[in-house]
Every structure is written in C-alpha cells, then in structure tokens.
Image (cartoon, helix red, strand yellow):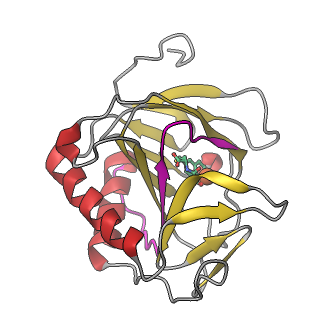
C-alpha cells in the first residue's frame, strides 16, 4: 500500500526498513499525562522557545529539551542559546516509555537507553523543513510520539532532501519508531491541520511531538 495514495491508512505499517508506524498507540489518558509533563518542561528550568538558526532566522515550532539540550547543531547540558540553565533531567519513566515503544515496534527493546527528548510544539502555521537528525553519536532508534492536531509527516531518503519520499498522516496517539537504515533519513512536517485534535488530551489547540533519542554522549 502506498501512503501517498492512501493518506488515511490507520494500520500498523513498516513504511521503510526500520521505520514502523503504530497508529493509536497512546491512550487518551497517557496522552494527557504526557501533555502535563510537557507543560512542566515548557515552564523551565529552560523555557520552551523558537530555536534560533545560525542564518539569523528562527524555527516556526517551539521546542524544549529534556536530558540534553539541542541547539543547531550540537547537544549541550546547559541551554547556552536560551538562559544558560541546566536542562531538566531525563526521568526513568521516559526511559521505560522508550523501551516499551521499541518492544511494540520491533518486539525487543534492544537495550534502548534514551537520554534526551525534544518536545516540539506546532502552533497554527508551524512546520518543519526536511532535515536529518545526525548530532547524536549513537545509531539507536528515534521514538516519535504525536499528540494534538493531525499532520502530514514526510519521510524521505538518506541521500537527498527531496524525492523519493512517503507522506504519512500522523494522528494524536500515534507512535513512530525510526531505526536501522531509516535512522538517518531526511524527514519533515510540511503541514499541520488546525483544530483536528481531541481536547480530551488536555491540548486545546496545536500539535505536540515528543522524540526520544540516545545521544551517545556523557
Ligand atoms: C526519522 N520532529 O524533532 S517526528 C525532530 O514531528 C523532528 O516534530 C518532527 O523531526 C516532529 O527532529 C518529526 C519524526 C521523526 C523524528 C526524528 C527522526 C522522524 C525521524 C530521526 C531520524 C529519522
Ligand atoms: Fe528530525
């Protein structure tokens, strides 16, 4: 089945080798807990903000990091591009959630030990251009959790930012795991559909994405 032709596919699928989409993995209750946790991280010690880009622009999404702070294009323990504070520590329950995600996707957690989470918030009109995540020194999978408004997630290839790519609709509660040959593929979020989330998650508007990663740093 081709996602581009069937954007409403809502079954589990391996979109590319190592890239597993599990629709509806998070219960509404679990999503509500995650929204609350993200609200806490967004307040501090490092406030959620639009990341400044080296070229002078800012990203349209707002981001807060947990465990390690990501800035273009490195990880640090302190948020030197925000307020200099040490980022929030990475909680044990989030390690367990990451392992459960890998068991769900691959049948085995592979000793997964995520130590950073990037929380992205998409307000109306926010998007994310095609990019690779390659600041991590580990080839361990990335776990992505979506809450709130539906979006188009574009999953590309490791060679170029352009075609070929596959568009997948991500809905509140969806899990996506990117491991193996998919770990360093280009990807982006070209569109978010406003007011398509379920307020029962605690998110009245917008889209929240949480990614768990292993930095390979110490
Ligand atoms: C595939 N976030 O934070 S999640 C990011 O929805 C990021 O906010 C998007 O891209 C978002 O870097 C997409 C899906 C995702 C995240 C990381 C990946 C896919 C990935 C890393 C490698 C391969
Ligand atoms: Fe990314």
Q: Quadrant of residue 204?
A: top left
Residue 108 is covered by the magenta coloring? yes
Image quarter in which the C terminus is found: bottom right
Residue positioned 42% across, 64% down in the render: 110
Query: Does 65 sit above or below residue 185?
Result: below
User: Residue 120 location, x and y as percent?
Assistant: 49, 55
Residue positioned 25% across, 46% down in the render: 26
Residue 102 is covered by the magenta coloring? no
Query: Does 199 sit above or below residue 89?
Result: above
User: Residue 191 location, x and y as percent?
Assistant: 56, 30
Q: Give the magenta part as a residue range.
A: 107-129
Residue 18 horizontal side relative to residue 110, left or right: right
User: Residue 106 location, x and y as percent?
Assistant: 40, 49
Residue positioned 57% across, 26% down in the render: 167
Residue positioned 48% across, 12% down in the render: 6
Residue 93 horizontal side relative to residue 71, left or right: left
Query: Does 94 sit above or below residue 164?
Result: below
Residue 121 horizontal side relative to residue 26, left or right: right
The secondary structure making up most of the magenta span is loop
């Amino acid at each position: 089945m081709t996602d581009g032709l069937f954007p409403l596919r809502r079954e589990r699928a391996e979109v590319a080798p190592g890239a597993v989409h599990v629709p509806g993995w998070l219960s509404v209750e679990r999503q509500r807990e995650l929204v609350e946790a993200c609200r806490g991280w967004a307040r501090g010690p490092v406030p959620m903000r639009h990341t400044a880009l080296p070229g002078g622009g800012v990203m349209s999404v707002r981001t807060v990091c947990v465990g390690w702070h990501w800035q273009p294009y490195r990880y640090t323990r302190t948020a030197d591009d925000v307020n200099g504070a040490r980022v929030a520590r990475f909680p044990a329950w989030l390690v367990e959630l990451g392992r459960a995600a890998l068991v769900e996707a691959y049948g085995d957690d592979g000793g997964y030990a995520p130590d950073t989470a990037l929380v992205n918030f998409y307000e109306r009109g926010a998007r994310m251009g095609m990019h690779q995540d390659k600041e991590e020194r580990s080839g361990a999978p990335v776990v992505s959790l979506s809450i709130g408004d539906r979006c188009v997630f574009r999953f590309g290839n490791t060679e170029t930012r352009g075609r070929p790519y596959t568009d997948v609709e991500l809905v509140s509660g969806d899990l996506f795991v990117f491991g193996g040959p998919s770990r360093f593929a280009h990807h982006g979020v070209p569109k978010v559909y406003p007011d398509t989330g379920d307020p029962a998650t605690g998110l009245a508007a917008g889209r929240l994405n949480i990614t768990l990663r292993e930095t390979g740093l110490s």
